[in-house]
Image: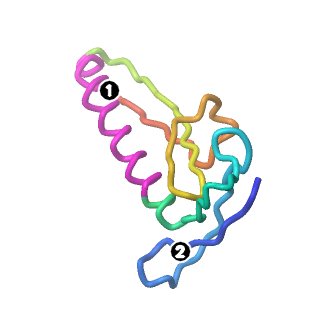
Amino acid sequence: MATFETELDDDGEVLFLMEAETTGAFSKSSAGETPRPHLAFKQAVNAIGMMGNRIATSVGPNIEGTGMQAAITFGIKIDASGQVMIASDTRNCQFSVQVIFKP
């Protein structure tokens, strides 16, 4: 996997490295795709928040009051140009997200 350096903040003061696929759906092509790791990170965080919220509002009311505890885990894959997708395998993703419902 290729590694891209980007920043966590808009001022570029907090840097981090992000791995991104360069084969399959995220292959480098002659289309002139330019890596955009900062955009990829922002979109991944936004997608994680939206998916977590959707899961919480859909599942939460069904568990509330039952005394049961449940956990839902999903993975997020991103490519360097900013595309975000749910990983088919949580062992092969850049971000692993777990939403836990407690009684």
Q: Residue 4: horizontal and vertical position, in percent?
A: 67, 66
Q: Which residue type does callout 2 highlight?
A: Glu
Along the viewing direction, whichever of 13 and 70 lies nearer the viewer: 13
Q: From which residue to which does the magenta span run? A: 43-65
Tell me the distance, in whole angstroms, between the alpha carbons under discs 2 and 1: 38 Å
Checking the image for residue 41, the label placed there is none
Question: Vertically, is 72 above or below 44?
Answer: above
What crowding class fits label 2: few (fewer than 14 Cα within 10 Å), some (14-19), or many (20 or more)?
A: some
Q: Earlier in the sequence, mark 2 or mark 1?
A: 2
Along the viewing direction, whichever of 78 and 25 lies nearer the viewer: 25
What crowding class fits label 1: few (fewer than 14 Cα within 10 Å), some (14-19), or many (20 or more)?
A: few
Left or right of 66, for residue 29: right
Q: Residue 6: horizontal and vertical position, in percent?
A: 58, 72
For discs 2 and 1, the disc positioned in front in the rendered view: 2
What residue is shown at x 53% (from left), y 79% (from top)?
14
Q: State the quadrant of the C terminus.
A: top left
As for residue 42 lying within the magenta part, the answer is no
Along the viewing direction, whichever of 44 and 35 lies nearer the viewer: 35
Q: Which residue is mark 2?
A: 7
Q: Residue 84: horizontal and vertical position, in percent?
A: 50, 46
Q: Which residue type does callout 1 highlight?
A: Pro
Q: How is the image coloured?
A: rainbow
What residue is shown at x 58% (from left), y 76% (from top)?
15
What residue is shown at x 52% (from left), y 33% (from top)?
74
Question: Vertically, is 28 above or below 6?
Answer: above
What residue is shown at x 64% (from left), y 46% (from top)?
26
Q: Secondary structure at mark 2?
A: strand
Q: Which residue is mark 1?
A: 103
